[in-house]
C-alpha cells in the first residue's frame, strides 16, 4: 500500500532534525452523492456504513480507526511496555485478503516505537516494540508482520525481520542492491529503484529470495529521480513517481507517474492533466488496483491546492477530485477528505496537510474523524 509515504517521511524528518477506479466507480460515487442530497439525506452514518462491502481504515491526527459494519473501532496507537508516550501512528497497511491490518507507531521525540497487527474478524491484536528506521517496507498477512530494512550503504545487506502472531521473531540478511524505496504487500516486498542503477527494481519474498524485475526508464541527465513509490496489496501493480521534492515542492517540471504491471513487466506512463506543476504528495491503491494519487499544485506558494487523480493499472486517468487530500472509491462508495497543503517547517521546508472539514463517506461526515491523512478500503 503504502506510500502514505509523505506522512511517514514527515515524521521521520522531524526525528532526524531532532536527533539527527475505474471511471465506473467514480461515476457511481457521484450518483450516490446526488441521491444523498435528496430524500436519503436523513440517513445516519451508521446506516450508510452498514451497506459498505469493504471496511475502511482511517489514519487521522495520528490515530488509526477502523470503520466496519457501521461502527468505528480504535486500532492504534497501542500502549507498549518500555516505550514512552505519546505514540503516533505514522503508517498502516492492509493484507491482500482485507482481513488483517498492520501499522507503525512511534514517539516523535525519541524514534522508539512499535508495530501492530489486528484481525478484523476475531479482533485479536498483537504488537512488538521496534526502533523506527528509515525507509521500511511492511508486509501484512495472517501470520503477522514482516519488515525489510535496506542496507546502510552499497556494501551492506538488507535485513528482513518477521514478527509472527505466535510470538516468534526472526531476522535474516538479504543480499539485494540497496534503495531508499521499499514497499510491501502480503507476499513480500518490491525494492527500488536501487541507488546504484537508479532504475532497477527487485522483488524480495518473505523467505528472503531475491528476483530481478524490470528496470524503470532512465531519468534525464540532471533530471529528477524516482521518489514516491507504492505497490498494490496483491503485488500486481507498482507505481513510481519521477519528480523533484527538494525543499518540499521541488523544482523542475511536473511529476511523472509510471505504472508497472508486475505480471507482464509492462510499463505505462500515466496521462496526467496539463497546466499546474503537479507534484505527488502520496499514493494509495484502492481494492481494484486503481491508484489514488494525491497531487499538489506547485505553481502556488505557501498555500497550495490539491487534487486526487484516479489512475488505472494501465496508466489511464479516469477521474479527479479537486481540493482533496484523500479521495478513494470502492464498490461505488466514496471516502473524501477536503483540504490543501501548506508549506511549513523551520529548519527545513515541510509539506503540511490542512483539512477543511471532517472525512466524509458518500457526503456524510464521520464523527471525530477530522484531518484524515490516509484512508484505505479493505481489498
Image (cartoon, helix red, strand yellow):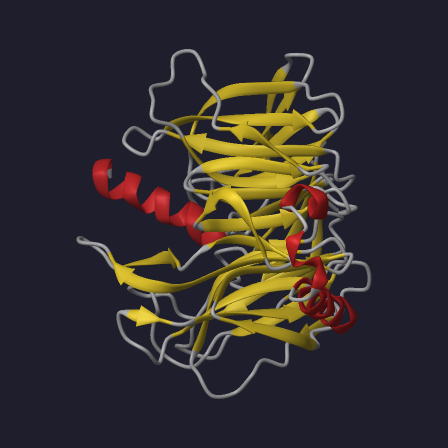
- Can you give x and y, in whole percent of width and height, for residue 255 in the image? 48, 74
Outermost residue toward the bottom in this view: 275
Instruction: State left or right for residue 153 relative to residue 16.
Output: right
Instruction: State left or right for residue 304 relative to residue 214.
Output: left
Instruction: State left or right for residue 114 relative to residue 204.
Output: left
**Measuring 78% from the left and 56% from the top, which residue is drawn there?**
331
Outermost residue toward the left in this view: 346
Nearer to me, 280 or 238: 280
Note whether residue 179 is visible: no
Note whether residue 372 is visible: yes
- Can you give x and y, in whole percent of width and height, for residue 113 in the image? 42, 26
Q: Give the quarter of the image for residue 330.
A: bottom right
Nearer to me, 24 or 318: 24
**Measuring 56% from the left and 26% from the top, which residue is drawn there?**
116
**Measuring 42% from the left and 38% from the top, which residue is drawn there?**
62
- Can you give x and y, in whole percent of width and height, for residue 318 in the image? 69, 76
Up-down relation of residue 111 to residue 263 (above or below): above
- Can you give x and y, in whole percent of width and height, for residue 83 in the image? 38, 18
Amino acid at each position: 500500500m503504502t506510500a502514505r509515504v509523505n506522512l511517514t517521511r514527515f515524521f521521520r524528518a522531524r526525528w532526524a532534525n531532532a536527533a539527527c477506479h475505474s471511471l465506473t466507480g467514480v461515476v457511481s460515487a457521484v450518483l450516490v452523492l446526488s441521491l444523498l442530497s435528496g430524500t436519503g439525506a436523513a440517513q445516519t452514518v451508521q446506516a450508510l456504513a452498514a451497506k459498505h462491502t469493504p471496511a475502511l481504515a482511517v489514519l487521522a491526527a495520528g490515530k488509526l480507526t477502523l470503520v466496519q459494519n457501521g461502527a468505528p473501532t480504535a486500532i492504534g496507537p497501542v500502549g507498549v511496555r518500555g516505550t514512552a508516550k505519546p505514540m503516533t501512528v505514522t503508517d498502516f497497511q492492509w493484507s491482500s485478503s482485507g482481513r488483517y491490518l498492520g501499522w507503525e507507531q512511534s514517539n516523535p521525540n525519541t524514534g522508539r516505537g512499535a508495530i501492530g497487527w489486528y484481525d478484523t474478524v476475531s479482533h485479536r491484536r498483537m504488537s512488538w516494540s521496534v526502533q523506527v528506521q528509515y525507509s521500511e517496507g511492511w508486509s501484512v498477512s495472517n501470520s503477522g508482520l514482516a519488515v525489510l530494512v535496506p542496507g546502510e550503504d552499497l556494501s551492506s545487506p538488507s535485513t528482513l525481520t518477521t514478527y509472527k502472531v505466535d510470538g516468534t521473531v526472526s531476522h535474516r540478511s538479504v543480499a539485494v542492491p540497496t534503495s531508499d524505496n521499499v514497499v510491501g504487500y502480503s507476499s513480500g516486498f518490491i525494492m527500488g529503484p536501487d541507488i546504484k542503477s537508479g532504475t532497477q527494481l527487485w522483488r524480495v519474498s518473505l523467505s528472503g529470495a531475491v528476483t530481478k524485475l524490470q528496470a524503470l526508464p532512465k531519468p534525464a541527465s540532471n533530471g529528477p529521480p524516482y521518489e514516491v513509490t507504492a505497490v498494490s496489496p496483491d503485488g500486481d501493480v507498482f507505481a513510481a513517481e519521477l519528480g523533484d521534492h527538494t525543499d518540499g515542492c521541488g523544482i523542475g517540471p511536473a511529476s511523472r507517474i509510471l505504472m508497472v504491471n508486475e505480471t507482464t513487466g509492462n510499463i505505462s506512463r500515466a496521462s496526467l492533466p496539463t497546466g499546474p506543476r503537479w507534484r505527488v504528495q502520496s499514493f494509495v491503491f484502492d481494492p481494484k488496483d486503481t491508484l489514488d494519487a494525491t497531487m499538489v499544485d506547485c505553481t502556488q506558494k505557501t498555500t497550495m491546492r490539491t487534487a486526487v487523480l484516479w489512475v488505472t493499472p494501465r496508466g489511464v486517468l479516469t477521474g479527479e477530485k479537486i481540493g482533496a487530500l484523500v479521495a478513494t472509491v470502492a464498490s461505488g462508495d466514496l471516502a473524501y477528505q477536503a483540504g490543501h497543503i501548506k508549506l511549513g517547517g523551520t529548519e527545513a521546508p515541510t509539506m503540511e496537510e490542512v483539512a477543511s472539514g471532517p472525512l466524509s463517506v458518500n457526503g456524510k461526515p464521520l464523527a471525530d474523524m477530522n484531518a484524515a491523512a490516509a484512508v484505505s478500503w479493505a481489498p
